[in-house]
Image: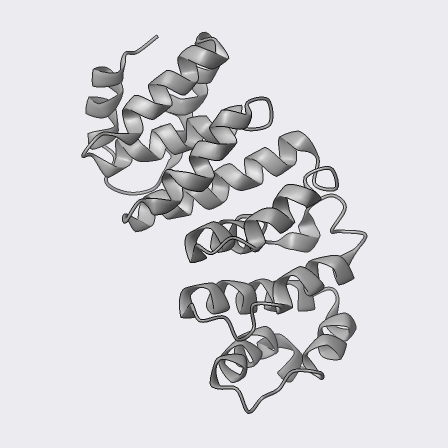
């Protein structure tokens, strides 16, 4: 198993994409105990190399369904990272947690993260679960996904509104009517809501 220094060196060679970073995390997960893997993830998160922090985040995502501390670290530590790449991996890590836990079983945690004060935590859910209706449970319950997403139509964070609007647009490909019914109730006098509406209805408007 590679040590932390070797992983940092390996990660620094990745300039584009995340494939090797994910593979590095998978290798650690397969060869270390959960406690060892979490310790390595924590060490990687303290690196100045963003790609190394990405490996740590991927690793926590692999651990989160079986390790409450790993899930807490994703929510409290990784979400505070200022690098956009780490935030992209946070979204992937949260989806991994949901997939391993089961999306319906993960609903309480999904709702908890969506109510968090941090826009990065909320966006990890809205972005991570795309395409929402391609995921088990939400595939059969698109209205649940729509209700969870539309609450951010006028969120203070434009970053989050864009994620929610694009996620609703994705859903509208196969479920246009439920999305139409939802957006019909929105107050388009709100500037943020108008922006989200344009994203959410882009494909519907083309029908």
Q: In this view, does 84 lie above or below 67?
A: below
Q: Is residue 21 visible?
A: no
* Quadrant in the rendering for residue 171: bottom right
Q: Quadrant of the N terminus?
A: top left
* Quadrant in the rendering for residue 146: bottom right
Q: Is residue 122 above or below residue 78?
A: below
User: For the image shown, how many numbered marks are present on the structure?
Assistant: 0
Q: How is the image coloured?
A: one colour
Tell me the residue at 34%/24% (across/down): 42
Q: Nearer the viewer, residue 161 or 114?
A: 114
Q: Where is residue 183 in the image (x, y as percent from the top left)?
A: 68, 79
Q: In this view, does 4 lie to the left or right of 32?
A: left
Q: In this view, does 68 lie to the left or right of 157?
A: right
Q: Residue placed farthest to the right in the image?
A: 140
Q: Where is residue 20 in the image (x, y as percent from the top left)?
A: 35, 29
Q: Can residue 197 be seen in this view?
A: yes
Q: Residue placed farthest to the front in the image?
A: 117
Q: Position of residue 190 (x, y in %)?
A: 52, 86
Q: Position of residue 203 (x, y in %)?
A: 62, 76
Q: Is residue 163 left or right of residue 88?
A: right
Tell me the residue at 72%/75% (across/down): 182
Tell me the residue at 59%/74% (across/down): 200
Q: In which quarter of the image is the C terminus?
A: bottom right
Q: Is residue 166 above or below residue 75?
A: below
């Amino acid at each position: 198993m590679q040590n932390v220094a070797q992983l940092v060196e390996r990660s620094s060679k990745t300039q584009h994409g995340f494939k090797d970073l994910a593979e590095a995390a998978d290798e650690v997960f397969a060869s270390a105990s959960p406690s060892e893997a979490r310790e390595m993830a924590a060490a990687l998160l303290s690196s100045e190399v963003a790609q190394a922090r990405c490996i740590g985040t991927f690793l926590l995502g692999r651990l989160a369904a079986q390790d409450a501390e790993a899930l807490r670290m994703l929510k409290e530590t990784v979400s505070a990272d200022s690098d956009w790449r780490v935030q992209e991996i946070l979204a992937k890590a949260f989806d991994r947690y949901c997939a391993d836990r089961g999306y319906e079983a993960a609903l309480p945690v999904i709702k908890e993260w969506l109510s968090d004060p941090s826009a990065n935590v909320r966006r990890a859910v809205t972005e991570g679960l795309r395409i929402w209706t391609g995921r088990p449970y939400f595939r059969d319950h698109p209205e649940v996904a729509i209700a969870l997403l539309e609450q951010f139509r006028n969120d203070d964070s434009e970053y989050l509104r864009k994620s929610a609007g694009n996620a609703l647009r994705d859903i509208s490909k196969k479920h246009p009517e439920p999305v139409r019914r939802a957006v019909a109730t929105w107050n388009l006098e709100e500037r943020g809501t108008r922006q989200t509406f344009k994203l959410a209805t882009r494909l519907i408007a083309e029908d």
